[in-house]
Image (cartoon, helix red, strand yellow):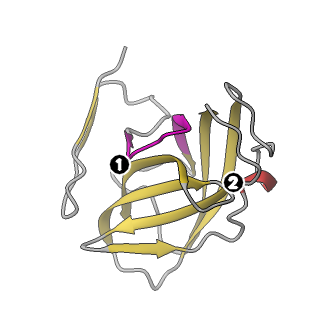
Amino acid sequence: MPTTSLSLAPSSYSIKTQDEDQDSLPMKDCGSVGGKVTSITLDPPPKGACTFPKGTNVTAIVDLVTNEVANQMNVVCKGQVVVWVPFKLPDPNACDQGVTCPTAVGKEYTFKTVIPILKEYPSLRLVVQLEFQDEKGADVICVQFPGEIC
């Protein structure tokens, strides 16, 4: 089994993976109360530390399990540079992208979204946070992973 260590300091991060073929990104739960993320993969796959090449659309594929019923689920994407900066998703409605709403307890879903990486973005390392929120705007699932815009 590959081992992965992850530091989520805002100014730097490190990814150490013994198995270079591992597809899923290292991640950290950030307060999930109604489920969990089981894996995150990006397409195109990261090249070294570069997870988000400028001028591309990166597809994020997030496998998750819900532990509560939510009638609606929206996704908020943020990046921590020094402060949290929102990254607008073209369609934040998870119910349109692989999550069946209302969600069911114990059900596995694969959420798939496109994250536009604009050429104007600065080159930097950041912590990416995905928040899956219910119809009241409360976080149901929250996950962080390291990223680099390059």
- Name the foreground residue: 122 vs 8: 8
Rounded to the nearest whole Å, what is the CA distance between mark 1 and mark 2? 32 Å
- Residue 51 can be seen in this image: yes
Task: Check if residue 109 falls in the magenta segment.
Answer: no
Q: Which portion, as a residue range, is magenta?
A: 28-41
- The residue wearing badge 1 is 48
**Does residue 150 appear anywhere in the picture?**
no
Whole-percent x, y for residue 150 in the image: 38, 68
| Residue type, label 2 | Met
Frontmost of labels 1 and 2 is: 2
Callout 2 environment at 10 Å: few (<14), some (14 to 19), or many (20+)? Answer: many
Image position of 31 with respect to 147: above or below: above
Residue 100 higher or lower than 96, as above or below: above
Vertical comparison of 122 with 76: above or below: below
Q: Residue at x 58, y 74 (%)?
A: 88
Assign the N terminus to one quadrant of the image: top left
Q: Nearer the viewer, residue 55 or 27?
A: 27
Please give the name of the residue rendered at 52% of the width and 79% of the height, measured from the top-left corner.
118
- The tag on residue 73 is 2
State the residue in front, 59 or 48.
59
Callout 1 secondary element = loop
**What is the magenta segment's predominant secondary structure?**
strand
Counting from the top left corner in percent of width and height, residue 59 is at 62, 55
